[in-house]
Amino acid sequence: MTSYLTVKDRVEHETEAKRSRFVCAVAPARTVEEAVEFIAERRRLHPAATHNCTAYVVGQRVQKGDDDGEPGGTAGTPMVQALVGRGFSDVVAVVTRYFGGVLLGAGGLVRAYGSAVTETLDQAEAGGTVARMVPARVVRVSVAHDQAGRVENDLRASRYALREVAYGAAVDFVVAVGEDEVDAFADWVATLTAGRARVAPGEGIHLAAP
């Protein structure tokens, strides 16, 4: 797992090339379903547009672009390349084109769609809407009931992200811990509980860097 960038909120930016308007909207998309929903929303918002071209990158493997009627490879592909080239994932981009009457040619289209995305990402970074996501791990900490109150208080006051508390025969805390901090976290819990806690690292995830 590697770190990547994503957007925390929607960002919209408009560019122009030879009188054609290119309205780019970028949004977070943690799943393909979220990406598809955002694309549908943008198409409903701009039904009179000449094209609504799209790209999304989800996780480490899913990359998809759609030219929406533009010549093959001139819109969706450069949009995907703009996202990946800047290190973004879990993100969707829609570039809405209103034709201005002048043909751009294949090279012009590639530049126009790619730059529409990169300029929008620039706007997102300038506006503080970009987050760096770093590798992390879900860690389950199990303690006896007599230690649960102190452990919970100290977890909530710590830099570690407490995600869930479950009371049963023992009390289980689900904590998100940076990949490079798992050993230090286990040591911290051991000290806090005099070695009585059970610490079990689980699945890999990503967390927003502080």
Image (cartoon, rainbow, N blue to C red):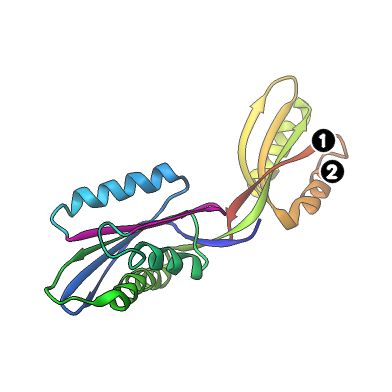
Identify the element where label 1 is drawn: loop
Residue 198, given in percent of the width and then of the height, sits at 81, 35
Is 169 located above or below residue 177 in the figure?
A: above
Answer few, some or many: residues within 10 Å of disc 1's Cα (few below 14, many 20 plus, some between 14 and 19). many
Q: Which residue is mark 1?
A: 197
Residue 29, given in percent of the width and then of the height, sits at 43, 50
The image quarter in which residue 96 lies: bottom left
Is 209 magenta? The answer is no
Residue positioned 40% across, 64% down in the render: 77
Q: Which residue is mark 2?
A: 190
Residue positioned 39% across, 73% down in the render: 122
Q: Give the mark, 1 or 2, whose residue is nearer the N terminus.
A: 2
Identify the element where label 2 is drawn: helix
Q: Is residue 158 visible?
A: no
Residue positioned 70% across, 31% down in the render: 172
Q: Is residue 88 visible?
A: yes
Residue 1, given in percent of the width and then of the height, sits at 66, 55
The image quarter in which residue 107 lies: bottom left
**Label 1–label 2 contact, CB within 8 A:** yes
**106 or 122, which lies in front?**
106
* Magenta-highlighted residues: 50-66
**Left or right, residue 188 beside residue 32:** right
Disc 2 marks a residue whose amino acid type is Ala
